[in-house]
Amino acid sequence: MIPDLLTAAQFSTVYNALSLVIAAQLFTAIFLLVSLPRVLPRYRPAVTIALIVCGIAVYHYFRIFDSFNAAFATDSVGGSDGYAQVAGIGFNEGYRYVDWLLTVPLLLVELIAVLALARKMQNRLLLQLVPAAILMIALGYPGEVSGDLGVRTVFGVLSSIPFFFILYVLFIQLSKSLALQPVEVRGTLSRLRFLLVLSWGVYPIAYLLPALDLGADGWVWKQVGYSIADIVAKAAYGLIIYQVAKTKSWIEDPEFAEHERPLSHPLRTVADLDKAA
Amino acid sequence: MIPDLLTAAQFSTVYNALSLVIAAQLFTAIFLLVSLPRVLPRYRPAVTIALIVCGIAVYHYFRIFDSFNAAFATDSVGGSDGYAQVAGIGFNEGYRYVDWLLTVPLLLVELIAVLALARKMQNRLLLQLVPAAILMIALGYPGEVSGDLGVRTVFGVLSSIPFFFILYVLFIQLSKSLALQPVEVRGTLSRLRFLLVLSWGVYPIAYLLPALDLGADGWVWKQVGYSIADIVAKAAYGLIIYQVAKTKSWIEDPEFAEHERPLSHPLRTVADLDKAA
C-alpha cells in the first residue's frame, strides 16, 4: 500500500501536512489549558478532556512524523530525484488507530460533559457511545493493515455498524437533551454533531482510496485527508466545546460573566430567563 | 532557488537570524504567559492568542533551524571553504507557509479580541478577516514552491486580492469601532494596523527577491528579511496588544489599577469619564 517512491513535492506535502497537525493540536491544547479559568468549574472537565484529546494526538503525530521521515530517503540534493522507501524501516500506519482508540471515545465524552446533564442520563448515553466508538475503531484496524481488498471491505462494513449506532444515539436519543440546553448554544451543539460526523466521514473515504488504485498520489491524499480530518475533529471541535462552555458559564453565573465578558457585550443570565418566564 | 554553496559568513548570518527568532518568540511567549494576571479576565483571551502565536512560531523555527543545519555541510575546519548543500536532505521552505497559515489569521483574531467589541460586530469582522487571511497564504504557497517566474507572478497577484481586502476591512470597516475605544489606546491601536501591514510588506518583497537574481546573497537576505518580519509581526505586535489590554484594564477597573499601576502613574478611570461627560 505504501508507495515505493515519492516525488519531492509529494514528500513535502505529506511532511508539511503531518507537521501542521502537530502545530495545530499542540497549540490548541496549550490554549485550552491556559483558558481553563475562563469557564466555570462545572465545565472544566469538558475543556480538560478537549485538551487531553489534542495532547494525545500531538504525541501520536510526533511518532507518525518521525516514522515517515525515517521510512523515506533521497540520494539527491534537495530530493530532486524523489524519495524512496529505505530498507530497515517501515512507515507505521497503525499509529493512527492507536490514537483513535483513545481519542474517539473521548470526543464523545467531551460532548456529553459540556451538556452537563443529570448523572443518570449522562451515564446512559456514555454506556452506549463509548463501547460503540471502541468497537468501531477496533473493527477498522484489521482492514486497514490488510493488503487484501476483500478483507478491507468485510471489516469496513463491520466497522460501519457501531458507526451507524453512534449516529442513532447522537441524532435521535440526544435530541431531547439538546432541547433543554440554553437557546444561545443549542444551534452550536446541534451543528457540532454534524462537524463530528462529517469529519469522521473523511476516514472511510481515505480508507477506501487505495481501492481506486491512484498510486502514490492516492496515498499522499489519504495522508493529507487524515491530517485535515484530525485537525477538524479534535482541535476545531475542542475550540467549539470551549466556546459552548464559556457561553453557558456566562449565562449561569452573572457575577462570573461580569468579569469575563467584554463591557459592550450584551448579557443574558438565568435571572433574565426567570424574568421572561 | 536554494543556493548550492554558501560562504561561512552567509551560513552564519542565516543561522544567527533563525536562532534570534527562536529566542525572541519563545521568551515573548513566556513573558506573556507570566503576565496574563496583569490584565482583566476579559482581556486574557487576546493575550493568550498573542502567546499562542509566538509559540507556534517557535515550533516552526525550531524545525526551520534544524532543516537548515541538516541541509548544508562543510568539509573544512570552521567552514572556511563554505557550506554546500548535502545530498539526502533539502531545506524545507514550506514550513514558513504552514506557520503563516496558522498565525496570520490568529494575529487578526488577536487584534479584534483586544477591542472587546459587541459579539455581533466581532463575529462580522472575523468572518471577513479570517477566511481572507487563509486564502492569502494558501494562494502564495504554489508560487513560493515553483521555480517558474511566471507561476510565481500569477500566484503573487492572486494572493494580493485577499491582502487588499484585509487592508479595506482594517482601514475602512474597523475605523468606526476604533472611535469607540478609550482615547488612551486609540492611537496605539490605529498604529498597530500599520505595523501589521508594514511587516507583512516584507513578505512580498522577499517573495520577489529571487526575480532580481541576486544569487546566494539574495537568498540569505530573504531569510533575514522573513526572520525580522516574523519578530515584528508576532513578538513586537503581541507585546503592544498586551500594553493595550493592560491600559484598558486599568481604565475599566480602578480597584485593579490601584494594585497594578506604579504609584506615580496618573490614573484615569471610567468614573472620571463619567464626571467629564
Image (cartoon, coloured by chain):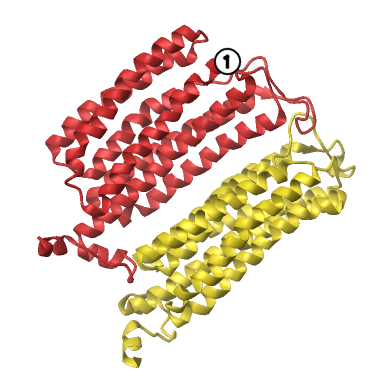
Chain colours: A red, B yellow
The reply, left or right, for residue A274 in relation to residue B118 is left
* Residue A218 figure quarter: top right
Residue B58 visible at all: no
Residue at 35% from the left image edge and 63% from the top image edge: B119
Residue A8: x %, y % from top left: 71, 30
Task: Classify mark 1: residues with Cα within 10 Å, few (<14), some (14-19) or many (20+).
Answer: few
Q: Please, which chain is the residue tagged with disc 1 on?
A: A
* Residue A212 figure quarter: top right
Secondary structure category for the residue under label 1: loop
Q: Nearer the viewer, residue A161 or B65?
A: A161
Residue type, label 1: Met
- The relative height of residue A81 versus residue B265 in the rendered view (above or below) is above
Q: Nearer the viewer, residue B92 or A241?
A: A241
- The relative height of residue B244 versus residue A206 in the rendered view (above or below) is below
Residue sitting farthest toward the bottom: B276
Q: Quadrant of the C terminus of chain B?
A: bottom left
Residue B157 visible at all: yes
Residue A2: x %, y % from top left: 60, 18
Residue at 54% from the left image edge and 71% from the top image edge: B172
Residue at 50% from the left image edge and 69% from the top image edge: B173
Q: Quadrant of the N terminus of chain B?
A: top right
Residue A188: x %, y % from top left: 31, 47
Q: Nearer the viewer, residue B11 or A69?
A: A69
The reply, left or right, for residue B15 in relation to residue A34 is right
Residue B160: x %, y % from top left: 66, 57
Residue at 75% from the left image edge and 29% from the top image edge: B88
- The relative height of residue A142 versus residue A272 in the rendered view (above or below) is above
Residue topped by disc 1: A1
